[in-house]
Image: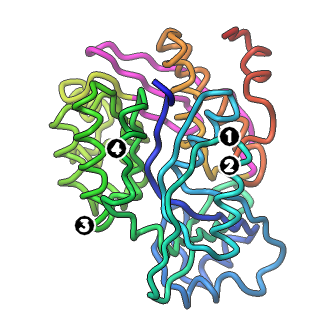
Amino acid sequence: KKFKILGIGNAMVDILIHVTNDFLSEHGIQKGVMQLIDIQRANFLYSDFGSKKEVSGGSGANTVAGLASLGVPTCYIGKVRNDPLGNKFRSDLLCMDINFETKFYKKSRLAETGRCIVFVTPDGERSLNTYLGVTEFLTENDIEPTKVELSDWLYLEGYRFDGLESERAFTKAINIAKKNNNRIALTLSDPFCVERNFSAFKRLIANGLDLLFCNEFELKLLYKTGKLEEAVRKAAVDLPLLACTLGEKGVLVCQSGKILEIPAKRTKPVDTTGAGDLFASGFFYGLINNQTLADCGAMGNLAAYEVIGHLGARPEVDLRSLFSREGFII
């Protein structure tokens, strides 16, 4: 295989801004979740709110970037326009040696490259205001069969399940992956995502998903229960492998009914944007290097620990050095 991981998901740029809790209340922004906005609201929120940091984002792209920084051969499929943010997204991936060849969106519709305006409060919590833009116009034509065939893992971003065209694109990629005995992973991405795409996620799990990434709230929503233990018990029946993050408590990993709880490295978060994305990077890195599940979970926790220590969802230190300092030698 040419690529270890092929990610399919949103292609957008994160705009990170420090604000107070009062700011969120004043502007009707729900704290700690992702809310979809239109271009007018995006332009309003983008203006006059102090210093900003622009970092290429998109949940699946962040995971792939984390893996690329570890030297893993990766590929990504996501839609941008030929505009300043679209060119930033593309060049950032190419600079990391990530294979990214999705064609620019060229139709005349008044839409721009997607952006996520992330308001970060003093507790490090992030409130995401997402203008999807052209990233939601991903279609079956964007799925290149050869790229899927050449990848060990197909990694699907839950955020990008919104919309009929995207679901068809994912279905095409899944069918190619299954035909080639490639493994398939899904990240649920967000509680609202689970609510909007409940049936699609359930179908995907029933059709033979190999690995599910989620957090505690998403898993409980998926199994319609308020109890984590019950959700995990049900997931253990449906899934060969589950990695459920528990915030500062770490992660719960379940395989063949066996449950491991792996504690997190404690730190005061600066910005939790991308914590789950980079957890997936570290976990995948362990998995493709045949580490124990306990070590996979610990490496995921370490990668998340690094990313919550600064603004933005891409690593700022060498993750391999971080892993080796903590005793992981690969």
Lateral position of residue 38 relative to residue 327, left or right: left
Q: Secondary structure at mark 4?
A: helix
Instruction: Report x, y in % for residue 270.
Output: 75, 50
Spatial CA distance of label 1 from label 2 is 5 Å
Q: Which residue is mark 2?
A: 94
Tell me the quarter of the image containing the C terminus. top right
**Viewer-nearest residue: 201 or 68:** 68
Question: Residue 45, located in which quarter of the rendered image?
Answer: bottom right
Q: Amino acid at mark 1?
A: Asp
Question: Residue 178, located in which quarter of the rendered image?
Answer: top left
Lateral position of residue 257 relative to residue 113, left or right: left
Spatial CA distance of label 1 from label 4 is 20 Å
Q: Which residue is mark 1?
A: 97
Tell me the quarter of the image containing the N terminus. top left
Q: Secondary structure at mark 3?
A: helix
Instruction: Report x, y in % for residue 170.
Output: 30, 51
Q: Nearer the viewer, mark 3 or mark 1?
A: 1
Highlighted magenta segment, given as a residue range: 243-270
Total residue callouts: 4
Q: Secondary structure at mark 2?
A: helix
Question: Residue 159, located in which quarter of the rendered image?
Answer: bottom left
Q: Secondary structure at mark 1?
A: loop
Q: Earlier in the sequence, mark 3 or mark 2?
A: 2
Q: Amino acid at mark 3?
A: Leu
Spatial CA distance of label 2 from label 4 is 21 Å
Q: Mark 2, residues whose alpha carbon is within 10 Å: few (<14), some, or many (≥20)?
A: few
Q: Nearer the viewer, mark 1 or mark 4?
A: 4
Q: Which residue is mark 3?
A: 164
Q: Earlier in the sequence, mark 3 or mark 4?
A: 4
Q: Nearer the viewer, mark 2 or mark 4?
A: 4
Q: Earlier in the sequence, mark 3 or mark 1?
A: 1
